[in-house]
Image: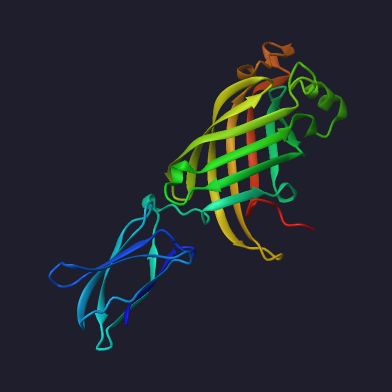
Amino acid sequence: MGLTARIRTRDGWAVSHAVVTMTDMTGAQVVRAEADGEGVVRDATALAPGAYTVIVTAVGYAPVASSAIVTASGRAETGTVTLARLGGTELPPPGPWTVDPAHSSVSAVAQHLGISSVHGRFTEFAASIEIAPDEVAKSRVEAVIRADSIDTGNGMRDTHLKSPDFLGVGTYPEITYRSTGLAPAGSDRWTVHGELTMHGVVRPVDLDLAYLGTGPDPWGGTRAAFRATAELHREDFAMNYNQVVQAGIAAIGTTLRVELDIQAVQGESLPQG
């Protein structure tokens, strides 16, 4: 006898911090129960047959109310209750996630001679994501990039980019990013506020983040995909080198567009093998 329910997100993930309350037709509370780690509520309170109202709440989600009928057996089964994120935006299951460099990319695009673009990428980096279980704004992102792993497809250009004119990899071997907060920016989109340290300079940088979905991988794990972009100005990071080729046109543009394609594995480390 009693109440049973399963609490899930729209993507089918358990909401382990959900609370279920049940009231009778007079509005009196007869049951208050918390979901377990699997998002399941089991409460053995004896219930009189009749109609009841079930309300499911969880921090960060819109509450859901529904009717339930208790049968002569004293049992009420609400089935699966689906909760939607406040603002309509879903995220992966809470907890730690580790970025998989083999299936991710960190790239940048700069204008060249005012007429075309130069594309570059960093080939060595590591990053972690922590999805907060209650308040999404408390989720965290940290990343470390080896500055000397820059690759634009041209050895002479890469050597110059590693020099003190630009990245100064001998003095500043790492580029780091640490988030300071998240803010919703639409359905499945977020603004990540954070600080970027590059060439010995720390500046606030926002990432425009899109969540692309979550699913199983062939190795028994769970993966989430994201895409993020940002715009940087070289002079903000003391990279003031330039060569003017004609009438104010610079050889290399001062604005960089950063593009991140990220695949993260659920857990604190990458799978072996």
Determine which quarter of the picture holds residue 164: top right
Front residue of 233 and 215: 215
Determine which quarter of the picture holds residue 194: top right
| Residue in the image at 16% along x and 67% along y | 28
Most extreme residue toward the right, as rendered? Answer: 155
**Residue 142 at what x, y percent from top left?**
61, 38
| Residue in the image at 46% along x and 54% along y | 90
Front residue of 184 and 83: 83
Name above or below for residue 100 compared with residue 34: above
Determine which quarter of the picture holds residue 129: top right
Count of residue discs: 0
Name above or below for residue 215 compared with residue 154: below
| Residue in the image at 48% along x and 48% along y | 132
**Residue 262 at what x, y percent from top left?**
64, 47
Q: Which quadrant of the figure contains the N terminus?
A: bottom left
Name above or below for residue 63 compared with residue 241: below
